[in-house]
Amino acid sequence: MEPGKEIIQEKTGKSPGMYFDRDNKMLLIEGRSIPENPELVFRPLKNWIDRYFPEHENLNIKINLEYINSGSSKHLMSVLKILRLYQSNGKKLKIDWFYEEGDESILELGEHFSETSGLPIDIEMLTGE
């Protein structure tokens, strides 16, 4: 692992990777999220967020999921609600949601999360560059 990087959840074929880059105060969530028990996958992230914010004022979050099932989607929404609580208490968040060109379902899910969570989520299309 690179210095300044923390693994919250290792990426597998069924679970997204969740990594924190201390130098850039950036949380990255990437990969596929189709685990048998999504609560076990997202619990370490929720615990990490609750440890992070008492000592820090801002967090950049990049979400790049190629696929997410409904169970994982529910748990990701609960993570966003936790983040919304921290934001309403003065913490600064920047959230980027990435989708592949032509992937309407991930695009629409990002829009849904932005509207439902009340968080400003920037939705960006990944280019093939």
Image (cartoon, rainbow, N blue to C red):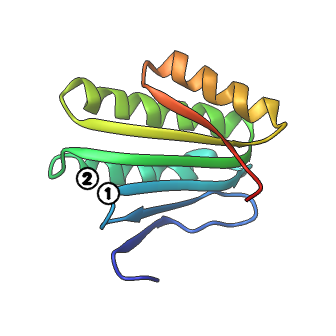
Which corner quadrant of the image does residue 14 belong to? Answer: bottom right
Residue at position x 62%, y 38% from top?
124
Residue at position x 47%, y 63% from top?
19
> Local crowd at mark 1 within 10 Å, few (<14), some, or many (≥20)?
some
Image height check: is 85 above or below 68?
A: above
Which amino acid, mark 1? Lys
Q: Residue furthest front?
A: 129
Which corner quadrant of the image does residue 67 belong to? Answer: top right
Identify the residue position indicated by label 1 in the image: 25
Which corner quadrant of the image does residue 10 belong to? Answer: bottom right
Q: Residue furthest left?
A: 55
Per the model, the C-alpha gap separating discs 1 and 2 is 10 Å
Q: Is residue 19 left or right of residue 89?
A: right
Image position, residue 54 (x, y; %): 16, 47
Which one is closest to the eye, mark 1 or mark 2?
1
Identify the residue position indicated by label 2 in the image: 52
In this view, the residue in front, 116 or 122, is: 122
Q: Is residue 23 left or right of residue 54?
A: right
Residue at position x 43%, y 82% from top?
2
Which amino acid, mark 2? Tyr
Q: Tag 1, which secondary structure?
A: loop
Numbered mark located on residue 46 in the image = none
Image position, residue 129 (x, y; %): 73, 59
Name which of mark 1 and mark 2 comes first in the sequence: 1
Q: Tag 2, which secondary structure?
A: helix
Image height check: is 1 above or below 6?
A: below
Pointer 1 and pointer 2: residues touching (CB < 8 Å)?
Answer: no
Mark yes or no: residue 46 visible: no
> Local crowd at mark 2 within 10 Å, few (<14), some, or many (≥20)?
few
Residue at position x 69%, y 67% from top?
12
Mark yes or no: residue 128 visible: yes
Image position, residue 16 (x, y; %): 63, 57
